[in-house]
Image (cartoon, rainbow, N blue to C red):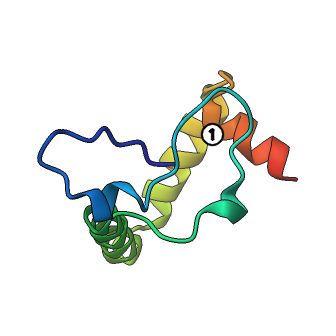
Amino acid sequence: MYFHIFSEGWPSSEISKSVELVTGDLNIDQIKTIPEILKNWIIYQHKKFIETQSQMNEKNLEQIRRDVEKNKKITGSDKSTNRSK
């Protein structure tokens, strides 16, 4: 999930591609387009994830597993994942 705040310099054509964050459920199906800068950021993050994924070894993966098991806090991501099931 990505959140962004618009400043005065943002073009209205980019702002109109966003979904307003309000109290309640967010309907992902209603999102048809996103601002270009956000799209580029997501693409960049995905590219970096793919690049680093190939560098992972069993030791790295085991460390991630241990870290995940230690963290017992319920995050917003966990709640979203559970709602989508």
- The amino acid beneath tag 1 is Ser
Residue 12 appears left or right of 84: left
Q: Residue furthest front?
A: 12
Query: Considering only vertical position in the picture, is 30 above or below 54?
Result: above
Query: Considering only vertical position in the picture, is 66 above or below 48?
Result: above
Question: Callout 1: helix, strand or loop?
Answer: helix
Q: Name the residue rendered at 82%, 51% in the picture.
A: 84
The image shows residue 78 at horizontal and vertical percentages of: 70, 37
Query: Which residue is nearer to you in this view: 53 or 35?
Result: 35
Q: Name the residue rendered at 31%, 62% in the picture.
A: 14
Query: Which residue is nearer to you in this view: 15 or 71?
Result: 15
Q: Quadrant of residue 52?
A: bottom left
The image shows residue 47 at horizontal and vertical percentages of: 32, 76
Query: Considering only vertical position in the picture, is 44 above or below 6?
Result: below
Q: Which residue is mark 1?
A: 77
Residue 79 appears left or right of 64: right
Q: Quadrant of residue 39?
A: bottom left
The image shows residue 53 at horizontal and vertical percentages of: 41, 71
Q: Name the residue rendered at 31%, 38% in the picture.
A: 5
Query: Which residue is nearer to you in this view: 82 or 57?
Result: 82
The image shows residue 62 at horizontal and vertical percentages of: 54, 52
Residue 22 appears left or right of 83: left
Query: Which residue is nearer to you in this view: 78 or 57?
Result: 78
Q: Residue furthest top?
A: 73
Q: Name the residue rendered at 40%, 58% in the picture.
A: 16
Label 1 crowd (10 A; few <14 / some 14-19 / many >=20)? few
